[in-house]
Image (cartoon, helix red, strand yellow):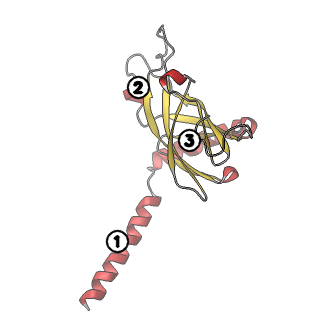
Amino acid sequence: MFHQAIIFSLGLLTLAGCNAQKNTKTPEQTTGTTTNMKENKSSEQKEGIVYFSQGENKFVKDYEMNVTFQGISEDSRCPEGVNCIWAGVAIAQIELMGTYSRPIVVSLATTENAGRNYHQSAVYNGYTISLEEVTPFPKSEGGAKALEGKYRIGIKFAKKNNSEKPGSTRK
């Protein structure tokens, strides 16, 4: 009897854990994402760009890939309304997982600079994945810290070029 109660309790905890994983967005985030997705639906179809809000996970059916925008690890872009010597860079941490492959985390930058190990695209599962857009820009008064949790990125997928080495993860 005691063992059955323990097994039953463990079963309930497992089910509760699965349900909690599915419901990770707050209603406010879900509403904002839906609105933004409607606004960008035409640009997604026209330009082939898929948009993600920070923390968002999507299965992109056309590319058979699960994509999670984990966050921005660096944002040194020049704030709006400020004159800067260097335009700066934003680096997005993106987890990619194909239907038949293990997940990897790639760092995609808003600019290509091999000397600083900044890459705007990466090759994964037969596709070149490129960071096309990071919004919003930092403001002079709040900086990048004020944008935490509010970032939105646009990623473009393209079939891998046959001239690239098989198995490479960087372009």
Q: Which mark, by number, is residue 13?
A: 1
- In front: 88, or 32? 88
Label 1 CA crowd tier, 10 Å (few <14, some 14–19, many 20+): few
Q: Residue at x 63, y 49 (%)?
A: 125
| Quadrant assignment, res 20 | bottom left
Residue 164 drawn at (x, y percent): 69, 38
Q: Amino acid at mark 2?
A: Ala
Q: Amino acid at mark 3?
A: Phe
Q: Which mark, by number, is residue 106?
A: none
Element type at marker 2?
helix
Spatial distance from mark 3 to mark 2, Cα to Cα?
A: 18 Å
- In front: 9, or 72? 72
Q: Residue at x 46, y 50 (%)?
A: 27
Element type at marker 1?
helix
Q: Look at the image and tell me whether residue 39 can be seen.
A: no
User: Cβ–Cβ below 8 Å for labels 1 and 2?
Assistant: no
Residue 4 drawn at (x, y percent): 30, 88
Q: Examine the rendered structure and indicate whether residue 19 appears above or below residue 160.
A: below
| Quadrant assignment, res 12 | bottom left
Q: Which residue is mark 3?
A: 52
Q: Which residue is mark 2?
A: 144
**Left or right: 158 with respect to 138?**
right
Label 2 CA crowd tier, 10 Å (few <14, some 14–19, many 20+): many
